[in-house]
Image: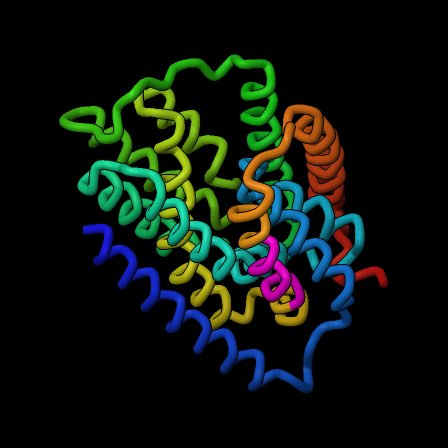
Amino acid sequence: MITLIWIALAILTVVFSAVLISDVNKHKDQLEDSSWLKTGLIGFVVNFFDVLGIGAFAPQTALLKFTKQTEDRLLPGTMNVANTIPVLIQALIFITVIKVEPITLVLMLASAAAGAILGVGVVAKLPEKTLRLVMGCALLVTASFMLARNMEWIQGGGTAIGLQGGKLILAVVANFVLGALMTVGIGLYAPCMALVFALGMSPQVAFPIMMGSCAFLMPPASIRFIREGAYNRKAAVGMAIPSIFAVLIAAFIVKSLPMVALRWVVIVVILYTAGVMLRAGMRDKGFNKMDN
């Protein structure tokens, strides 16, 4: 079963890469006015800490917003496209080294992908004002999960490496919803980890489930963003390439760091960004273009 997952992830990597390269090459003379250096640093930093459990979407939203690298309406698509290959690499690593009961893993991965495929068609067509409000709320949800984790309000966990019966059905349905929500910028890691803990599974099992879910949902979702033209091509590529090296360094060299203090900093930044997004979304007139 793990071999089949590996093959599926390899196929997704090839297909996604071909679609992205073709689209960027087709529009190579129309690339956005983003900074290769700024986006590259953002991609490296967020994916480095993503491997260590911080999550990428919320801090990435904040950094892209602060450095004014893309329009708000393109944020979900840009982040999904930029993080797809790094997440595929993470999934390959963690699915290999951490044992999960195959049926549980496969069903949860498939449900997340199905949720994303349905969700992205809606997100790509949302007006920018609506998207700001949705992303502001998404950031508040992410900050809430991170706060709960830091305060140890999320309790549970056990030794199980798989689920059966009602618990398995609940996990599959919940991961479908999380997959759909990820297309609007709600990172899957924190709520998925809370779900795994609540169902009595081993905390280690959260990593292959979280990263595998993202690896299966992001390529099809990102391909739809690409075909809709709902992403910043230059920013996405600028973040994607250094992110690959960040994942490998974090997974094989660094492996772990004291993260509690960093999470508090990230929570503050996310809350500030959520406030900015919500304030802009509630204005009568939004700002639609990059202010570089």
Left or right: where 139 falls relative to 170: right
Please identify the residue farthest to the front as the structure is shown.
253
Q: Quadrant of residue 165?
A: top left
x then y, percent, for residue 17: 46, 72
The residue depicted at 33 percent of the width and 48 percent of the height is 96
93 or 19: which is nearer to us? 93
Left or right: where 144 falls relative to 215: right
The residue depicted at 48 percent of the width and 59 percent of the height is 84
Q: Magenta stretch: dominant SS? A: helix
The residue depicted at 75 percent of the width and 52 percent of the height is 286
x then y, percent, for residue 155: 44, 14
Q: Which of the image's four quarters has the C terminus?
A: bottom right
The magenta-colored residue range is: 238-246
Number of dots carrying numbers = 0
x then y, percent, for residue 172: 26, 37
* Protein image colouring: rainbow
Please identify the residue farthest to the left as the structure is shown.
165
Q: In which quarter of the image is residue 162?
A: top left
